[in-house]
Amino acid sequence: MNRYRISFSQRLFWSIFAMFLGFTACFLLFQYQREHEFAEEKLNNMLDNYNHQLYRIISRNNNDIAASVRLFISDISQKDLRVTIIDPQGKVLFDNSDASEFNNHNNRVEVKKARLQQKGFALRKSKTTGIKYYYVATNIGNYIYRSALPWELFTQKALTIDTRFIYFIGIMMLIFFVVLSRFTFSIGQTIARLRDFALNIKSDRISDNDYHFPNDELGDISQNIITLYHQQRKLKRQLTQNVAHELKTPVSSIQGYLETILNNKDLDDTKRQFFLERCYSQSTRLAYLLRDMSVLNRLDEASELFDVAEVNISTMLTEIEKECSQMMEDKKITSTLKIRENLVIKGNYSLLYSIFRNLFDNAIAYAGENTHIEVDGFKEDEDYCYFKFSDNGVGIAKEHLERIFDRFYRVDKGRSRKIGGTGLGLSIVKNAINYHKGQITAESILGKGVTFIFSLKKDCTKKESEAD
């Protein structure tokens, strides 16, 4: 079936070209009608003018119709002009055709129109001569002056449309055909490469070879898709390695301690208790790691499953401050909360808790002793609350700031593992803020501390269009 399937570029080309042909046909029909009407109006005006000239000439020549008509025709180029003069009763007073007898002419189409509208025209075969004429009749003083030309030569020429625009349209169609074919071919090539890329992904045959795309918006989008895929693939590989490494460390420790206990049955109680405590500590770290990974996976894949309720931020921060009071006291860390009372955000309690608790834990673990933590709700608007979480501790070097929200990224890997962190705290902070439709940035100067500036939407269930 695919062998005989019409490609997208061909369908696009013929669809656009068919629309262009339809538009061109409508334009040509309109132009034809317009040109026809213009030519007909030009001929009408000429013959009507002849009728008025004949009336004036006949009036000057004392109504000598035959002599006046001969004089008039001798002065114009249309020598085959037929002239007819009809009285109010429809009787033909004069006709320069070869006919010898005329019946009443008031029933002629052009004469009827002239009686009613002062001027009438018709293209028909003469009942008198049997020749096809183009007639124009003019009512002057209730007498009909009628001029007619045979439907030949000049008449056909006068009603022939100027076809130069047709040739112009033909040239434009040729140019359009070439340009459109090149354009659709380029689009087709881009889509074909993207299709090849998608098929390779499906069959897991992605190579590191570059895909080349045209230098246009579609090419840029295509190139970005492939670049993002390779970046995600690389990040996935790194994440897998990091997860394996982070799991390996506590598991190996637990295994080592248990092997020591099992292989040394005469181990004294003190050492046995020490090893068991280390096993418990590492298993706790492993549980925290799995918990944090579970939270991140839920944020990535099933964020709609989080319950939403009204959360009092000032009350939550007071509780977190109490929970961390012992750890802060041990390191001589103080804190200040500048949050207005009854500041309520409609969001998920556990995620909002994770944001502020992880920032507290991060500051306690890495800011150093004798430092101060400040949480400031410095701004509010109709839709968002804005916060600053800062400490005046050791700070973070500039080269690390852009990556501190990456999963498992550690500024000081050895110290971080020694403290027992999972490497996922700030990543959870960023993703939880994203869930609440906010953004976070970090600023730091070595030796002067770190400041996290972030926003949280007051109602994360409210759509952006509704907020606007």
Image (spheres, rainbow, N blue to C red):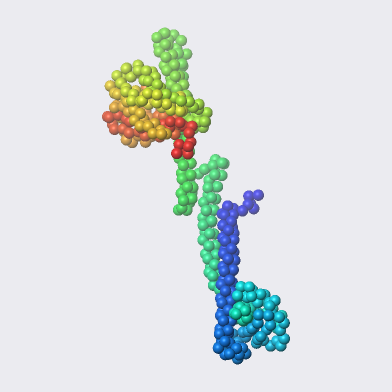
Judging depth in this view, the residue of 66 and 399 nearest the camera is: 66
Residue 339 spot, x, y in % from top left: 35, 25
Q: Residue at the spot x=40%, y=24% of the render?
A: 342
Judging depth in this view, the residue of 313 and 183 nearest the camera is: 313
Asked where in the image residue 37 lies, by quadrant, the reply is bottom right
Residue 352 spot, x, y in % from top left: 43, 26
Q: Residue at the spot x=43%, y=21% of the render?
A: 285
The residue most toward the bottom is 67
Residue 424 visible in the snapshot = no
Residue 162 spot, x, y in % from top left: 56, 73
Tally of marks: 0
Asked if residue 253 is positioned above or below residue 140 in the image, the reply reads above
**Which quadrant of the figure contains the C terminus?**
top left
Judging depth in this view, the residue of 418 and 6 nearest the camera is: 6
Asked if residue 109 is positioned above or below residue 455 in the image, the reply reads below
Residue 439 spot, x, y in % from top left: 40, 34
Q: Along the horizontal axis of the image, is 196 left or right of 106?
A: left
Asked where in the image residue 261 lies, by quadrant, the reply is top left
Judging depth in this view, the residue of 456 and 149 nearest the camera is: 149
Residue 267 visible in the snapshot = yes
Q: Residue at the spot x=45%, y=19% of the render?
A: 283
Q: Residue at the spot x=54%, y=72% of the render?
A: 164
